[in-house]
Image (cartoon, helix red, strand yellow):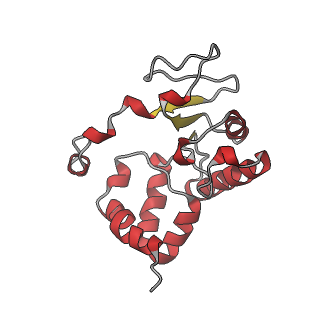
């Protein structure tokens, strides 16, 4: 029997997230190709995701590729397609980008800037200073020549968050 893993994950993850109201409490991204599938599998969850994108949605590529592995043209296609779909849903352009697996390179940053992004999410150890040293301050935003900021993930210890605290509004 062939499993429909999108339907299984929707039932175990996306549906509960939408029903518990968590999308109004956290920033999130959802790949537009997945959202299109959710619209067919679970229309009520898809509607909640779409409504929550306006306030808490973070931009992403239309699909989930490792962006540094793509050609510049392919990066432009998947990033602009993600921006366009985000705009269709929310009426606004996304400001922050969450790269798949936080994989990022300079070429991708340039494409993000060309598409109007102002910031992106990454880990502090991914940033190398001009002198070759690693980033010393994980809480600080690093600004690049083309005016994109990075938002460091490691300033926040995700392991200390309990799902129950989020549900009860204790964050």
Image quarter in which the N terminus is found:
bottom left
Q: Is residue 126 left or right of residue 163?
A: right
The answer to which of 77 and 169 lies nearer the viewer is 77
Residue at 69 percent of width and 22 percent of height: 145
User: 43 above or below 145?
Assistant: below
Picture quadrant of residue 113? top right
Q: Residue at x 52, y 64 (%)?
A: 35
Q: How far across and how far down the image is residue 69, in percent?
A: 68, 47
Height in image: 98 above or below 20?
above
**Residue 88 rendering spot, x and y as whole percentages:** 62, 58
Q: Looking at the image, is 39 positioned above or below residue 21?
A: below
Residue at point 40% right, 69% down? Answer: 10
| Residue 42 visible in the current orientation | no
> Residue 170, image x and y in percent?
21, 41
Q: Give the position of the C terminus as an image quadrant.
A: top left
Q: Nearer the viewer, residue 24 or 162?
A: 162
Q: Residue at x 56, y 16 (%)?
A: 133
- 16 relative to 73 in the view: left or right: left
Q: Position of residue 147 (x, y in %)?
A: 66, 26
Instruction: Tell me: residue 154, above or below residue 87.
Output: above
């Amino acid at each position: 029997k062939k499993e429909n893993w999108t339907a299984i994950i929707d039932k175990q993850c996306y549906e509960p997230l939408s029903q518990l109201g968590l999308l109004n409490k956290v920033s999130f991204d959802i790949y537009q190709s997945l959202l299109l599938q959710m619209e067919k599998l679970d229309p009520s969850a898809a509607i909640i995701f779409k409504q929550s994108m306006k306030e808490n949605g973070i931009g992403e590529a239309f699909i989930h590729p490792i962006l540094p592995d793509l050609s510049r043209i392919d990066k432009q296609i998947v990033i602009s397609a993600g921006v366009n779909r985000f705009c269709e849903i929310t009426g606004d352009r996304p400001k922050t980008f969450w790269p798949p697996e936080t994989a990022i390179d300079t070429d991708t940053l340039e494409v993000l800037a060309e598409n109007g992004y102002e910031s992106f999410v990454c880990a502090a150890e991914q940033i190398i200073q001009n002198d070759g040293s690693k980033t010393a301050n994980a809480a600080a935003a690093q600004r690049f020549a083309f005016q994109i900021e990075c938002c460091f993930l490691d300033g926040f210890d995700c392991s200390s968050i309990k799902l129950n605290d989020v549900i009860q509004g204790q964050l």
